[in-house]
Image (tube, rainbow, N blue to C red):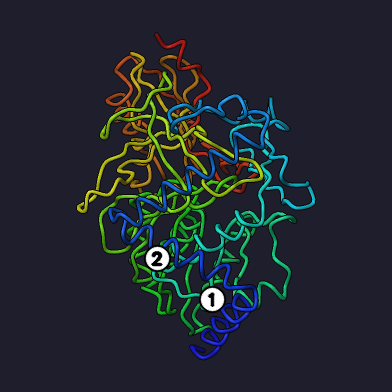
Amino acid sequence: MKAIGGLRQKLFWTRDRFSRNVIGNNVNDIREILNNYSSPGSKARRADLLSGLMQHATSTTPFYRQFCNFTSLNDFPVINKNIIRSNYESFRSDRFKKYETSDVITSGSTGVHLIIAQDKRKQDRNTADTIYFLEKGNFKIGNELIYVRKWTKALRKPALLAWLQNVTMVSVTDLSDEYFEKFIRKLKRRRSEKGILSYVSALTQLCRYLDKVKSPPLRCNVTSIIAASESLTTYCKHSMEKYFGVPVISRYSTMENGILAQQFPGGTSDFHINWASYIIEIFDLDEDVPVEHGVLGRIVITDLFNYAMPMIRYDIGDLGIMGTDENGVPVLKVLHGRRMDMIYDTSGKMITPAVVWELDELNGIRQFQLIQTGKASYTIKLNAENTFNADADIILNYKKHFGQDAIITIEKTAEIPVLESGKRKVVCNNYDPKALN
């Protein structure tokens, strides 16, 4: 089995050599920049990438031409999805014909879909980023990658390509107990080394199933588990490690850009930023000014490689806290997800969404969702076992977080619906935070 994985790896890199080592050169560039972040060479390379992007954007796109006299990144405004949608054609570079680019469509989890054009150079960089960060997650190119996500028609790989890349496509819409039973049997039969890349909610469903059938630890040669798109919970992390025997790490990425940051096995909970392909800044919650390390703010990125549709100082809509690691390299210390899904207590103070994950520790709960419906009103939806009877304890506990005047309603449901993206929204805020004052 190892021989087949090695053969696929050789085929991949042989094909790349015939394509002028485009992917290989990008992977080497990423390694050089990230592995030597503080070196003069790395600093110069990152500066050149940023300078090249700003020069290109101000000379080839209508939106950025007004900033042609820039002196630094600080001269550019913060943009967001709404600004791009309202000025779509003015963000497109006139150096690229439409047939020379490919469109990437966001999931629409926060509203209307966003379409971003990407050029071939950007797509190649994304491929190289994927290889680098998979390797940092203990995954070897050529091994089987079990990829669990919403596989739309546009994203699904042709059968031959999936075989060549050794990708097993698992749809989140298929995850029943019957499917998990067959899935585990297949894992045990295929003894070759394999990795799992999945939404956290899908991994959690798998863990709940293994709990229910009282499964012992599995021996199926999984060497890498990467959780993406959703916050990694303590329950999911510990349960996956218990059943599969390898650490679970979390990845931070977006459809419109690519891999922004990732945790590494055996280290801290820090998210190591992909400085080789992006500039990441943390901005004040209300003003377009950067904040210092240790302060919660809006995550704003500059994509260094998408020349077809430059995105400079793009407000993703997520919140985070930046700090430094033991080597002095800037990292994301905290990721809080969408600002529109932050929860506020009854006095209007923003509280960490991590409090909702306390429900993850209770036996008998399959799925849950917290919704803020008013200044002091909250609904907790529970998909739980019939024997679950801890409603009063939950209300008492969450009053400590939200305020003793909080009105908390427990609503039992047979299923928490998934979004169009295939993910489940764990936290929702249906009340305008600005009205909380």
Query: Which quadrant, please, contains the C terminus?
Result: top left
Badge 2 amino acid: Gly
Q: Nearer the viewer, residue 79 or 349?
A: 79
* 267 versus 294 height, above or below: below
- Circle number at residue 296: none
- Circle number at residue 144: 1
Q: Is residue 391 left or right of residue 167?
A: left
Q: Is residue 329 visible?
A: yes
* 218 versus 98 height, above or below: below
* Horizontal and vertical percent position of residue 83: 62, 26
Q: Quadrant of residue 348?
A: top left
Name which residue lies at 47% across and 24% down: 372
* Horizontal and vertical percent position of residue 16: 60, 75
* 317 versus 274 height, above or below: above
Q: Secondary structure at mark 1?
A: strand
Q: How many marks?
A: 2
Q: Is residue 386 visible?
A: no
Q: Secondary structure at mark 2?
A: loop
For the residues labelled 2 and 1, the Cα–Cα distance comes to 14 Å
Tell me which numbered mark, 2 or 1, is placed earlier along the sequence.
2
Name which residue lies at 69% across and 57% down: 155
Name which residue lies at 51% across and 91% down: 3
Q: Is residue 231 left or right of residue 425?
A: left
Name which residue lies at 50% across and 18% down: 431
- Circle number at residue 137: 2
* 22 versus 102 height, above or below: below
Q: Nearer the viewer, residue 61 or 156?
A: 61
